[in-house]
């Protein structure tokens, strides 16, 4: 018995020593006294300690546990607010070979604004984007994680350079083969010249292959048809707005018939018909259908505000214009010149339409539609600046009628869930990647507080407010 007791005593001593060793192990980073914002529940968990190793949140516990941790680096959050890294779910990296370096220089602007993941909605710089992704992962380049569509799919002679032309249904498999060989993350469809049959064929074939589809939609198709075919994300609000007209089917038929003639009905003529026939009840019913089909929407409200007022707003003193390269700034001219030629009636209609678009957002939220915040920042989109424009989009969401908590979800967990990345990103939880933004004030009280960044952590790498300002200064100096 004395022998067994000695063994037990020895075992207990070893166990205690092991526990002590575990408690005293040195971690990469410990954040103490943090108010963790639970974006899913829409509340705050005060007094939290976060333990981070190898860029992963290992543990979250109360303040009383903080003393047991040793760390290479410690941040006392002093009651500040921790949110997940932000997602901009609609940007563009584009402009051709001449603008490759200028696009690359934009990447730190996202990080400087707490945007740790972006969804590139199609462009002509895919080889460069793949290289940037590798460099960002390796820590050789400062920038957000990039989810990308690669080249857009469109019809013959498309508007955007670098698009893959798909003229007939027979060409659809080869186009999707190309995108799969490139290894894109989703399929982006554009509507400058694409036909109804080709659009629907792309969506159906991509669905059969397990490829996510997103994009614009020709007015020869109803959103209901697109959803039934498997469309996952509708970009902007034109198409959801179209579904709110009780006359959508008849208007679509007229547009489809006219498209075969030498006098096709124009985009803005159709919008006028839809505006005059829009019905909130019809829209609410359709939004429930969207929610049931798990079809998401990216409203892009901020860019509409900017572009609709180009004819009168002076952007020459914009703070962020200093970070934009001369080549990209020159791409702004096309929209600016177009805005100067607009009639007063056209401007008024755009303002009325934008006001109507704002009413769609809370109605979609109430129906359970997944809303994804996206800025549409990029070359050719005048004065819609990378990074900061996502915060402006969140402000527009709240102006439209969402609560700050609902708006915050559109730029965090919603994107991560919809893009199949929720196990790694989107919330502040154990086992998730340590993409964290420490804010000086509570974003659930005022959404603009997302702009008041104290510290950013990207996969465990720490940027102080001074570091973030240094990033901005470096972009300005290039």
Image (cartoon, rainbow, N blue to C red):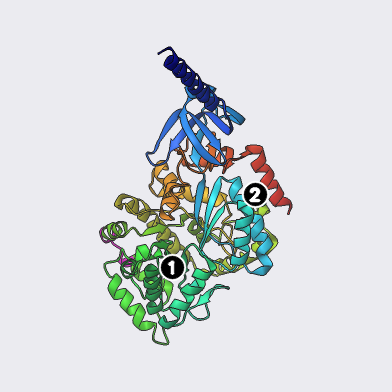
Q: Is residue 411 left or right of residue 314?
A: left
Tell me the quadrant of the picture where the C terminus can be found.
Answer: bottom right
Q: Is residue 198 magenta?
A: no
Q: Position of residue 292 (x, y in %)?
A: 28, 57
Q: Is residue 253 visible?
A: yes
Residue segment shown in magenta: 276-284
Q: Is residue 117 left or right of residue 105?
A: left
Tell me the quadrant of the picture where the N terminus can be found.
Answer: top left
Task: Name the quadrant containing residue 315.
Answer: bottom right
User: Residue farthest to the right?
Assistant: 477
Q: Is residue 180 left or right of residue 331?
A: left
Circle 2 packing at 10 Å, graded few (<14), some (14-19), many (20+), is few
Q: Position of residue 206 (x, y in %)?
A: 41, 70
Is disc 2 placed on a helix, strand or loop? Answer: loop
Marking on residue 216 = 1
Is disc 1 placed on a helix, strand or loop? Answer: loop
Q: CA distance from mark 2 to mark 1?
A: 34 Å
Secondary structure character of the magenta stretch overall: helix
Marking on residue 139 = 2
Q: Position of residue 57 (x, y in %)?
A: 51, 38
Q: Is residue 154 visible?
A: no
Figure check: 296 above or below 449: below
- Give whichever of 185, 296 is nearer the camera: 185
């Amino acid at each position: 018995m004395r022998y067994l007791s000695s063994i037990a005593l020895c075992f207990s001593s070893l166990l205690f020593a092991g526990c002590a060793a575990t408690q005293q192990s040195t971690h990469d980073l410990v954040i103490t006294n943090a108010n963790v914002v639970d974006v899913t529940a829409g509340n705050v968990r005060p007094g939290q300690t976060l333990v981070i190793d190898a860029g992963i949140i290992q543990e979250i516990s109360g303040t009383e546990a903080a003393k047991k941790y040793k760390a290479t680096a410690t941040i006392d959050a002093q009651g500040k607010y921790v949110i997940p890294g932000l997602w901009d779910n609609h940007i563009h990296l584009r402009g051709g070979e001449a603008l490759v370096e200028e696009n690359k220089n934009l990447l730190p602007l996202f990080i400087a604004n707490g945007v740790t993941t972006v969804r590139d909605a199609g462009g002509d710089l895919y080889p460069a984007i793949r290289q940037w992704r590798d460099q960002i992962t390796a820590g050789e380049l400062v920038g957000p994680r990039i989810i990308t569509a690669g080249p857009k799919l469109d019809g013959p002679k498309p508007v955007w350079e670098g698009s893959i032309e798909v003229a007939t249904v027979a060409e659809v498999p080869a186009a999707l083969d190309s995108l799969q060989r490139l290894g894109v993350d989703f399929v982006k469809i554009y509507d400058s010249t694409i036909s109804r049959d080709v659009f629907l064929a792309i969506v159906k074939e991509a669905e059969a292959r397990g490829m996510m589809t997103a994009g614009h939609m020709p007015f020869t198709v109803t959103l209901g048809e697109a959803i039934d075919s498997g469309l996952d994300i509708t970009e902007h609000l034109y198409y959801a707005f179209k579904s709110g007209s009780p006359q959508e089917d008849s208007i679509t038929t007229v547009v489809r018939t006219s498209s075969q003639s030498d006098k096709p009905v124009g985009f803005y003529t159709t919008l006028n018909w839809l505006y005059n026939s829009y019905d909130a009840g019809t829209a609410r019913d359709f939004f429930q259908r969207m929610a049931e089909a798990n079809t998401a929407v990216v409203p892009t409200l901020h860019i509409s505000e900017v572009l609709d007022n180009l004819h009168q707003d002076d952007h020459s003193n914009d703070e962020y214009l200093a970070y934009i390269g001369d080549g990209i700034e020159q791409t702004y001219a096309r929209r600016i010149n177009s805005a100067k030629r607009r009639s007063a009636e056209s401007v008024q209609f755009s303002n009325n339409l934008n006001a109507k678009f704002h009413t769609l957002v809370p109605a979609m939220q109430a129906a359970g539609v997944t809303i994804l915040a996206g800025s549409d920042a990029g070359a050719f989109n005048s004065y819609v600046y990378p990074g900061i424009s996502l915060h402006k989009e969140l402000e527009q969401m709240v102006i439209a009628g969402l609560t700050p908590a609902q708006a915050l979800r559109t730029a965090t967990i919603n994107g991560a869930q919809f893009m199949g990345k929720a196990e790694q990103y989107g919330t502040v939880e154990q086992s998730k990647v340590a993409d964290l933004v420490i804010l000086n004030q509570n974003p659930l009280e005022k959404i603009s507080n997302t702009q008041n960044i104290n510290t950013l952590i990207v996969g465990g790498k720490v940027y102080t407010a001074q570091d973030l300002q240094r990033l901005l200064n470096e972009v300005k100096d290039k």
